[in-house]
Image (spheres, rainbow, N blue to C red):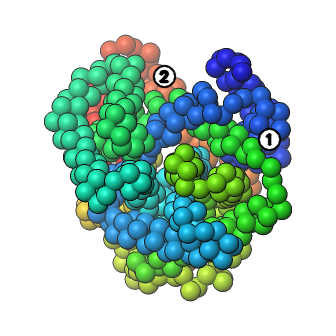
């Protein structure tokens, strides 16, 4: 078999070619990586051996991804959506596991294989969901946060299962209790060490960007390695390591630094998944895989939507959460591999799991990427999943606002200051629940919502405002807002990062388009002319800028 470097070269080369072809026909990159695994794996060309180096590298990729997920798990969010995530996660696993067991028994599987199949198909893929929601910039949305919370709960359940299964095979109830106690003890230890020791080390390391990156990765891998030495889940160790960093002021910086290396290992992870398909594909195997795939892709999201509806969330939020969880998890393959190694299940169950994983991950990638247009086409049939919860935020629906600001973020900070100085009545709309929570605490009129959702825009009477300012640079989102402003005299200011999109927005009737890079250049040019290129006055401008930056850093809403 080829060396590690040769295998990586083959994988990256084939993945690049297939990804480029996929880009031409506008296919998600995840599908390209899975297809790469099938092509280079034993089923077709047998160019790499997934059981050697690739498995180890894929494991590192999962650990790093769960570390990144942990850094996104802000406990302030859990205060508002924790109930939905915890109860939703546990209930989803219980219901899907029970239904999968019944299906497996109906298809003729004996008791033990049916139990393994039921457990494996209960979990959704954190790798797929985080990758695609990050690409779509939806990880901080309400549905993104709830889906993430459910995945965290599922990850903990999977970790407990991976610990308990081997112990049940060789020991009794006391051994299981010892393993669970050890798991809880390790989690508590990592949190305490992180809070009292690692946080101080992180502050010192932050003085140098390279050292901060190195210390962060070392922390993730070290905690994962310690969990492995204690015969616990490496992946959960990395997740806990990330959660320790979540409350740090350096969490955003660390996530951006680790992203590159994470993406490389995630590619290897998906290739590894695809390469696992190595057994003959029989008609019976395909039939079983299709039945389970239909259940996971169609019935499971209905179960999830029904559960989240009980918490009062609107049908769009419920649909987005359900759509995000329509695939089999990376933990599923680990559970099945464990059962196979212990002699509990035959090769056919392993092949079934891999095939179902390939089908659901591929199709769910399309579903998540195109969830907005899919929702728009199905919205009128989803009334059953519409919760009765009031708007999330601080809004008076009877109030007529002078200005509606769509998107707080970086631009909105200064705009809100201007609104206050001008004593205007304004409403802030944002799809980050943490932003809305912090604005509400300040007494600012605000509401959680997605401007791609036409029903939401109707509900806030957007057409009655005198001025609408959108800081969201998404072309289709701004065009959607335009539909509610036909000849009613409302001033509409949009935002774009692309010249051709800005021109199209003007053609569609937008009054002014904010282009941050152009405005930044214009401001700098004006400042240089005004200050006559004088070093002293430019340094004074710099001091003022530092003051403004610090003011922004103190604003938890950004």
Nearer the observer: mark 1 or 2; the answer is 1
Disc 2 secondary structure class: helix
Residue 81 horizontal/vertical position (percent): 36, 66
Q: CA distance from mark 1 to mark 2?
A: 67 Å
Image quadrant of residue 186? top left
What is the quadrant of residue 378 in the picture? bottom right
Q: Could you say which is closer to the camera, residue 209 or residue 361?
A: 361
Viewed as shown, does residue 190 lie left or right of 387?
A: left
Q: Nearer the viewer, residue 202 or 429?
A: 202
For the question of whether residue 486 can be seen, the reply is: no
Residue at 40% over, 44% down: 233
Q: Residues within 10 Å of mark 2 (few under 14, many from 20)?
A: few
Q: Where is residue 290 shown, x and y percent of the image?
A: 74, 66
Secondary structure type for disc 1:
loop
Q: Which residue is mark 2?
A: 529
Q: Nearer the viewer, residue 193 or 279?
A: 279
Q: In the figure, residue 422 lies in which quadrant?
A: bottom left
Tag 2 or tag 1, which sits nearer the N-term? 1
**Would residue 516 be found to the left or right of residue 289 on screen?**
left
In the figure, is residue 468 to the left or right of 36?
A: left
Is disc 1 in contact with disc 2, using a CB cutoff of under 8 Å? no
- Judging by the rendered image, the residue that carries numbered circle 1 is 43
- The 10 Å Cα crowd at callout 1, few under 14, some 14 to 19, many 20 or more, is some
Residue plotted at (46% across, 31% down)? 258
Can I make out residue 496 in this image? Answer: yes
């Amino acid at each position: 078999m080829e060396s590690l470097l040769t295998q990586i070269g083959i994988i990256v080369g084939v993945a690049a070619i297939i990804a480029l072809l996929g880009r031409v026909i506008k296919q998600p990159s995840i599908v390209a990586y899975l297809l790469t695994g099938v092509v280079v794996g034993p089923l077709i060309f047998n160019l790499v051996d997934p059981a050697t180096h690739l498995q180890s590298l894929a494991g590192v990729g999962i650990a790093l991804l769960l570390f990144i997920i942990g850094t996104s798990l802000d406990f302030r969010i859990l205060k508002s959506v924790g109930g939905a995530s915890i109860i939703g996660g546990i209930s989803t696993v219980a219901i899907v596991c029970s239904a999968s067991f019944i299906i497996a028994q109906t298809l003729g599987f004996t008791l033990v294989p049916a139990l393994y199949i039921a457990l494996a198909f209960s979990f959704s893929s954190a790798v797929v969901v985080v990758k695609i929601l990050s690409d779509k910039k939806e990880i901080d949305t309400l549905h993104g946060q709830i889906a993430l919370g459910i995945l965290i709960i599922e990850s903990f359940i999977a970790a407990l299962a991976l610990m308990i299964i081997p112990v049940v095979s060789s020991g009794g109830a006391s051994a299981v209790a010892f393993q669970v106690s050890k798991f809880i003890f390790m989690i508590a230890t990592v949190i305490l060490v992180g809070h009292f020791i690692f946080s101080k080390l992180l502050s010192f390391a932050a003085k140098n960007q390279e050292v901060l990156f190195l210390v962060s990765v070392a922390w993730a891998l070290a905690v994962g390695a310690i969990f492995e030495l204690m015969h616990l889940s490496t992946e959960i160790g990395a997740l806990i390591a990330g959660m320790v960093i979540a409350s740090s002021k350096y969490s955003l910086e660390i996530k951006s630094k680790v992203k590159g290396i994470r993406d490389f290992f995630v590619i290897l992870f998906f290739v590894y998944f695809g390469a696992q398909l190595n057994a003959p594909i029989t008609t019976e195997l395909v039939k079983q895989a299709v039945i389970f795939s239909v259940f996971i892709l169609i019935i499971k999201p209905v179960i999830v939507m029904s559960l989240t509806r009980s918490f009062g969330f609107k049908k769009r939020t419920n649909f987005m959460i359900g759509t995000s969880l329509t695939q089999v998890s990376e933990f599923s393959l680990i559970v099945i591999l464990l059962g196979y190694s212990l002699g509990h299940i035959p090769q056919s169950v392993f092949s079934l799991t891999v095939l179902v994983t390939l089908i659901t991950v591929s199709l769910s990638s399309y579903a998540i990427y195109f969830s907005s247009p899919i929702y728009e086409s199905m919205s009128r049939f989803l009334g059953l999943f519409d919760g009765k919860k009031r708007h999330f935020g601080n809004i008076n629906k009877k109030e007529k606002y002078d200005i509606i600001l769509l998107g707080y973020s970086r631009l909105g900070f200064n705009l809100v200051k201007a609104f206050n100085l001008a004593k205007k009545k304004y409403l802030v709309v944002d799809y980050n629940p943490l932003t809305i929570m912090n604005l509400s605490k300040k007494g600012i009129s605000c509401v959680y919502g997605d401007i791609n959702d036409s029903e939401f825009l109707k509900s806030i009477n957007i057409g009655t405002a005198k001025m609408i300012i959108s800081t969201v640079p998404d072309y289709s989102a701004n065009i959607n807002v335009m539909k509610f402003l036909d000849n009613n005299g409302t001033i509409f200011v949009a935002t774009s990062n692309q010249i051709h999109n800005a021109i199209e927005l003007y053609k569609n009737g937008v009054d002014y388009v904010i282009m941050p890079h152009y405005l930044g250049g214009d401001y700098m040019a004006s400042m240089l002319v005004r200050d006559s290129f004088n070093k002293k006055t430019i340094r004074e401008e710099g001091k003022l800028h530092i003051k403004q930056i610090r003011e922004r850093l103190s604003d938890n809403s950004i």
